[in-house]
Image: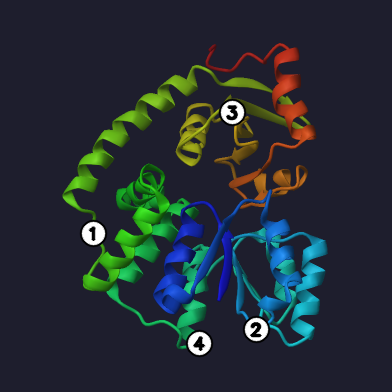
Amino acid sequence: MKIFTDIDLDGFGCGIVAKLAFGEQASIAYCSYRNLNQRVEAFVNNPENDREELYITDLAVNSDIEKKLVERNKSGKHIRVIDHHVTAKHFQQYEWGLVRPEYEDGRMTCATSLFFDYLFEQKLIEENQAAMEFIELVRQYDTWEWDANDNKAAKRLNDLFYILNREQLEAEILERIQEHPEGFFFTETEDMILNLEEQKINRYILSKSKQLVQTSVDEFNIGIVHAEQHVSELGNALHLQYPHLDMVALVNVGSKKIGFRTIHEHVNVAEFALRFGGGGHPKASGADLTEMAFEKFVINVFDTPPLRNETGR
């Protein structure tokens, strides 16, 4: 089987679930919005993959590739799209599309939890306590519930994901879940590393708060900062510090990505990200740093005097 999934913790969680269900038969391609369509197109155009099971999780292909998936399904070839972003809800019209932003009890979903639920219903994977605890940590971090629940273990899992090599972490987590099914845990070494990382992140947020520039982009008052790491935590922390802003934009010129974060109910950054070919959640989204986005969030910002913020900074 082949799975195309996102490069973040939720995408990684989907990879873990695939390995638990299919073992070494699972071939996982971690993708960004920039290369997803090209890689999926190459896969579906190759006749050698006609009998392969195809899963796309946590990412949405464009309309052209969507049409190719429709044709793939009509010709009797396997396809399953599993997503939780509201910007992917149009895939729900297909029998092979599963898009569910929240559970019936009101909890927000993530791709990892939806993928596991689907495979469990199909009797392709078995429950164990460690796997369920791991999936819940991924879900709480991806939906930002960890902050409201003060579930620091979810945040620490995401920190560990960015500290360790992906292949190394995948092997260690799979071994931990399979050999210690009674519950998920961090090792003493991991705890030591994570304590040091927490101190580093706090220093990073402090330094970036001094670099934030406030300006107008379209109809929004936005705080813009260049950020290469810890995007979700940084965006949330900065917006709490500057709540009068509509959102915070986090620009990474090196990776050509931009993230958007908001703490407000009346601002939907998923819809805002669509203007730049991106998507995501109402309070957390992202997009490629296209030429238009680069002009709005980099060039225009430094050609125009920034707005003075309400705290006088």
- Between 48 and 162, the one nearer to me in the picture: 48
Callout 2 crowding tier (Cα within 10 Å): few <14, some 14–19, many ≥20: few
Which amino acid type corresponds to the residue marked 3 in the rendered image?
His
Which mark's residue is nearer the viewer, 1 or 3? 1
Which amino acid type corresponds to the residue marked 4 in the rendered image?
Gln
Q: Give the vertical position of 12 relative to 193 (above or below).
A: below
Left or right: residue 157 compared with residue 57: left
Instruction: Say the numbered circle drawn on residue 51.
Output: 2
Instruction: Say the numbered circle drawn on residue 95.
Output: none
Q: What residue appears at the point 23 percent right and 59 percent down from the top-left corner? A: 185
Instruction: Say the numbered circle drawn on residue 185.
Output: 1
Please provide percent x and percent y for residue 168: 35, 54
Instruction: Say the numbered circle drawn on residue 122.
Output: 4
Q: What residue appears at the point 50 percent right and 87 percent down from the top-left corner? A: 122
Instruction: Say the numbered circle drawn on residue 244.
Output: 3
Which mark's residue is nearer the viewer, 2 or 1? 2
Which amino acid type corresponds to the residue marked 1 in the rendered image?
Phe
Which mark's residue is nearer the viewer, 2 or 3? 2
Q: Secondary structure at mark 1?
A: loop
Q: CA distance from mark 2 to mark 3?
A: 54 Å
Looking at the image, is mark 3 or mark 4 earlier in the sequence? 4
Q: What residue appears at the point 48 percent right and 22 percent down from the top-left corner? A: 209
